[in-house]
Each structure stands twice: as structure tokens, then as C-alpha cells.
């Protein structure tokens, strides 16, 4: 996203805990000001632990930040961790005009993310998701939406902006698409109980607090709560989001 904005002539300040040109750590307030001072618009990725966002939002106001695009989550209360809910509340109460990007699960989880690791290690994706479906989104679409909003003369929309792919898939169906694209055995999906999932997750080294959040999200999928499409990508970019086939094909072209 930063590269895209720079290619359009925008000055971009990269700030992160590990790789940005400007050091930034959510849990070290002395790094905040140097990251946001002199910035008119900000793209905000939330921390992995709950915190009080009030002080950060106050700083954005004091530094004259006009618009923030905040990456939160679809149905932010479902995870139960309070991170996205707390962030959206703090920004909504401030004078900083804010857009909350609320994406569905990333399609890239099957190729480079958390699902890919389990599939490569065992050949089986074990989750407590049942036959529920999810409209997986390509994270490139999220980045393009964020870039587009940040570069607008008058950034819009403000408030929640749900983002999804164009079609919902069960996990079993998604693996079939991956197999069709790659021409290989992509592995199989096994729906398991919550207790089995928690045991597996602990063995994989996933932090306990994150395990519960993921559990809540998978259970929501199993109950069909995520099986709906949002038009946020089209609203901002004027085109349909990438399909799951597109995502898997592009990944396959890069890695082969």
C-alpha cells in the first residue's frame, strides 16, 4: 500500500515496530509522536492485545491528523477480545474523521498464512467451522481500498466499511478451488470440536488469549453468521473484488 501511494506522488511515512523507517510500538508511547507528527492522514493497524486507544487518538487530534483509515474486523464484537471494538469506539468519539475497514478472512491464509502452515505440515486443515461459509477476501483489495481512501481529496466513506470477496466458500470448497488452480492435492478439511481445536492450537503454540478469539470466529462461521457478501470494495474501487480463484492463481504464478 505504501509503495502504491508513493508511486502516485504521495509522501509516505512508514512506521512499525520492526521494519518501518520510523520506529512505532503500540505499547511504547514515547514512539507515537514521531510517527504521527506532521501527518495529515494515517493508516492504522491495531495491536494484537487489548489496550486503551484514547491517548493515541488524542495525539492524532493534537497533531492535526484529519483522517484515519483503521483496519479492524468484520463483526468486530464476535472475537470477544475487545481490540477492534475498543479502537472503533475511541476513533468514533474523536474529531479525527475515520474509516473502519472491516474485512472478512484473508484468502491468503490458504497460501501463506495460518491455514497454509497446518496444511503443509499435516495435509489436513482442522477447524471448528463445520460446513459454514466465508467470503474470503484478497488482502490486495484491502490495501487498494485503503490507498484509494487515503488519496482522495475528501476521503470517504467514514464509519464502518465491511469488505468481502465476491462469493462465500466453505473451507472444503476453498481447498477444492486451491487444488483446481495448482493441479495438486491441496489437502483436506476436517471439522472438529472446539475442545479438539483448542488442544491443536495449544500444540501449535498459539497464545491462549488468541486461541479463544479464533475459537469465537470459527464458531461464528460454523453457525452461518459470516455467510453474506458486502459491496465495500466495489463502493470504493468501482470494480468487483478478486475471486478466490484469482488469489490462488496469482500466488501459484509467483511461486512456480
Image: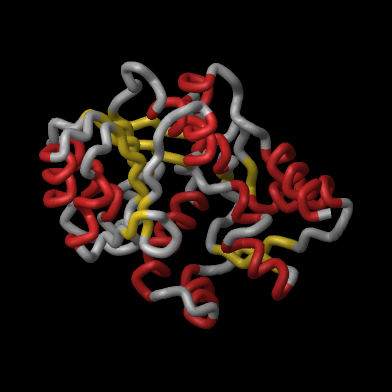
- Please state, as top left, top right, bottom left or bottom right, where the C terminus lies in the image: bottom right
| Residue 106 seen in the figure | yes
The residue shown at (26%, 55%) is: 82
Count of numbered circles in the view: 0
Instruction: Tell me the quarter of the picture where residue 62 sits.
Output: top left
Q: Tell which of 13 and 174 is nearer to you.
A: 13
Q: Tell which of 193 and 169 is nearer to you.
A: 169
Q: Is residue 35 left or right of residue 197?
A: left
Q: Residue 213 at x, y = what percent?
A: 38, 62
Instruction: Tell me the quarter of the picture where residue 162 sits.
Output: top left
The residue shown at (24%, 42%) is: 88
Q: Residue 71 at x, y = what percent?
A: 38, 43
Q: Is residue 198 above or below residue 222?
A: below
Q: How is the image coloured?
A: secondary structure
Q: Is residue 177 above or below residue 51?
A: above
Q: Residue 148 at x, y = what percent?
A: 46, 26
Q: Is residue 202 above or below residue 249?
A: below
Instruction: Tell me the quarter of the picture where residue 216 sits.
Output: bottom left
The residue shown at (64%, 68%) is: 117
The residue shown at (28%, 54%) is: 83
Q: Is residue 28 above or below residue 37?
A: below
| Residue 228 seen in the figure | no
Q: Residue 64 at x, y = what percent?
A: 17, 34
Amino acid at each position: 500500500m505504501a509503495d502504491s501511494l508513493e508511486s502516485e506522488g504521495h509522501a509516505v511515512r512508514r512506521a512499525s515496530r520492526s521494519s518501518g523507517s520510523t520506529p512505532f510500538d503500540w505499547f511504547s508511547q514515547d514512539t507515537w509522536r514521531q510517527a504521527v507528527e506532521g501527518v495529515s492522514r494515517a493508516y492504522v493497524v491495531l495491536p494484537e492485545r487489548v489496550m486503551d486507544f484514547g491517548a493515541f487518538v488524542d495525539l492524532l487530534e493534537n497533531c492535526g491528523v484529519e483522517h484515519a483509515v483503521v483496519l479492524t474486523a468484520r463483526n468486530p464484537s464476535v472475537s470477544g477480545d475487545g481490540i477492534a471494538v475498543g479502537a472503533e469506539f475511541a476513533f468514533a468519539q474523536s474529531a479525527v474523521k475515520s474509516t473502519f475497514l472491516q474485512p472478512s478472512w484473508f484468502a491468503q491464509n490458504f497460501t501463506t498464512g495460518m491455514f497454509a502452515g497446518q496444511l503443509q505440515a499435516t495435509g489436513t486443515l482442522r477447524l471448528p467451522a463445520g460446513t459454514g461459509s466465508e467470503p474470503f477476501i484478497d488482502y490486495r483489495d484491502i490495501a487498494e481500498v485503503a490507498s484509494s481512501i487515503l488519496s482522495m481529496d475528501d476521503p470517504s466513506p467514514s464509519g464502518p466499511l465491511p469488505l468481502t470477496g465476491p462469493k462465500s466458500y466453505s473451507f472444503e470448497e476453498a481447498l477444492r478451488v486451491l487444488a483446481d488452480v495448482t493441479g495438486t492435492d491441496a489437502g483436506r478439511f476436517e471439522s472438529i470440536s472446539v475442545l479438539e481445536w483448542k488442544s491443536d492450537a495449544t500444540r501449535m503454540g498459539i497464545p491462549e488469549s488468541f486461541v479463544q478469539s479464533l475459537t469465537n470466529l470459527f464458531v461464528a462461521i460454523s453457525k452461518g453468521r459470516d455467510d453474506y457478501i458486502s459491496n465495500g470494495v466495489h463502493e470504493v474501487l468501482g470494480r468487483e473484488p478478486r475471486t478466490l480463484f484469482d488469489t490462488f492463481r496469482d500466488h501459484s504464478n509467483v511461486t512456480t
